[in-house]
Image (spheres, grey):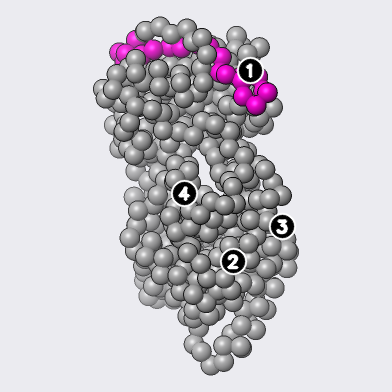
Amino acid sequence: MNFSFLRTGAALLLPLTLISAVPTSRTQGPKPDPQVLAQFGLYNNPTLQRLIDTKGQQMNKVSDRPGDYGFTIVDSPVINAFATPDGHVYFTRGIMAHFNSEAQFAGVLGHELGHITAKHGQSQQRRSTAAGIGLLLGSIIAPKITQSIGGIAQQGLGVLFLKYGRDDERESDQLGVKYSTKIGYDASQMADFFQTLQRNQAASGGSGVPDFLSSHPNSADRYTTVKKLAAQAKQNAGGQQLTVGRDSYLRMIEGLPYGDDPRQGYVEGGVFYHPDLKFRMPVPSGWKSQNSPSQFQMGEPNGKAIIVLVPAGGNSLDEAAQGLAKAIGLQSANAQRTTINGFPAVVMQGEQAAQQNQAGAAVLAHVIQDGSNYYGIIGLTAPATLSTYANTFNGVAQGFARLTDASKLNRQSDKIRIKTATGSQTLAQALTTSGVPASRHEELAILNGMQRTDRLSKGMLYKSVGK
């Protein structure tokens, strides 16, 4: 959660209406969609952005359907890449961290561009009205709370990803091989990357947050098929020398944040900490949570209630409270002033206006002022269960406090550190030398696309992690 770009204006800067499908007539094209950036945030790295722009446009020119397409890297640790029907490809910094060569990067880029040029997204979109790009809050405010989420992690990011079928995936794999080979890369590397994806998914045990393989179904023969396609493409390329680009790519990702960025907020020990905004807030025991640049969400595990922390724009506490009430359609709100841990606050209770023949939610919301910043803590549940969750809603808001613990304030993210092997040694030995504990060796082996027992030659580059 990073509210820095949301602080201007008097209105709550969130899409609070139910978004079903994104109309196929949208022509966002080369510009990243504001709703995608609100969900993930932009990852500002000129070197990597130049890479995806340059290679994306090279592929565009040799593709089956050149167009006005765009390419963006977003600030998410999730390992994913996705293409929206309007002609834009997004890579997460999480997937950038897991590539081990320019050729792997190019293969997946060609795969995503293939979804666009083959119009998979547009046909998939017509088959599904649930494929909209929207934030969780916008998705659940109108429907009955008890039926709208079966666990917060299953919804949040999931609404961003179209679910492709096996035939679409096979065609995109073919196009990924075709496009990456045409711009001079060894497409067999894409097959190796699918093994990295499979190992990572198996190790994570399924977090509920969509990754590449959950939004792009895998097939048992995918590795073999892509290897065969790549070999054929290489043969068709004649004597052309195809590039892998391992060292050049690894040098480009030196310093890339790896995993969650605690500067944007993190959960630890049942508490949400935000070092940059200097506050802390409890997370109800057993509830699921999800952070994004524009909001922090907590969900009761059975989907019966939700609490969302959002920025509330305004020039005064009253103005912020009124703007929040209007934005969420709060009717006949009972509002009163209070103080929470020294912060001026307003507490509001009422019902959200019913929409589309659906009952509105019961709302218990707090607006808290911290200097010139205003925060809305919105508790939502079905009207019949407000008495059950009111104490939880109040407890979270009452627990909002100044963060003063230096160890929490100074938390920094892990970063990719590119190291050079000093002699012939196994990857595990090299990682130990780099200060990586044995408990993380398998994780780092997956990150390197290697096994722990693989031997490195002297001078070989490999990935480690550090501050």
| Sooner in the amino-acid sequence: mark 3 or mark 1 | 3
The image shows residue 56 at horizontal and vertical percentages of: 47, 68
- The image quarter containing residue 301 is top right
Residue numbers of the magenta segment: 339-360
Residues under labels 2 and 4: Cα distance? 19 Å
> Given this view, does label 3 or label 4 mark the residue nearer the observer?
4
Residues under labels 2 and 3: Cα distance? 16 Å
- The image quarter containing residue 225 is bottom right
| Sooner in the amino-acid sequence: mark 2 or mark 3 | 2
Residues under labels 4 and 1: Cα distance? 32 Å
| Sooner in the amino-acid sequence: mark 3 or mark 4 | 4
Residue topped by disc 1: 382
Residue topped by disc 2: 117
Mark 4 closeness class: few <14, some 14–19, many ≥20 residues within 10 Å:
some
The secondary structure type at the circle numbered 1 is loop
User: Residue at point 68% right, 53% down?
Assistant: 124
> Given this view, does label 2 or label 3 mark the residue nearer the observer?
2
Q: Which amino acid does label 2 sit on?
A: Thr
- Residue 294 visible to the viewer: yes
Mark 1 closeness class: few <14, some 14–19, many ≥20 residues within 10 Å:
many
Residue topped by disc 4: 33
Q: What residue type is labelled 4?
A: Asp
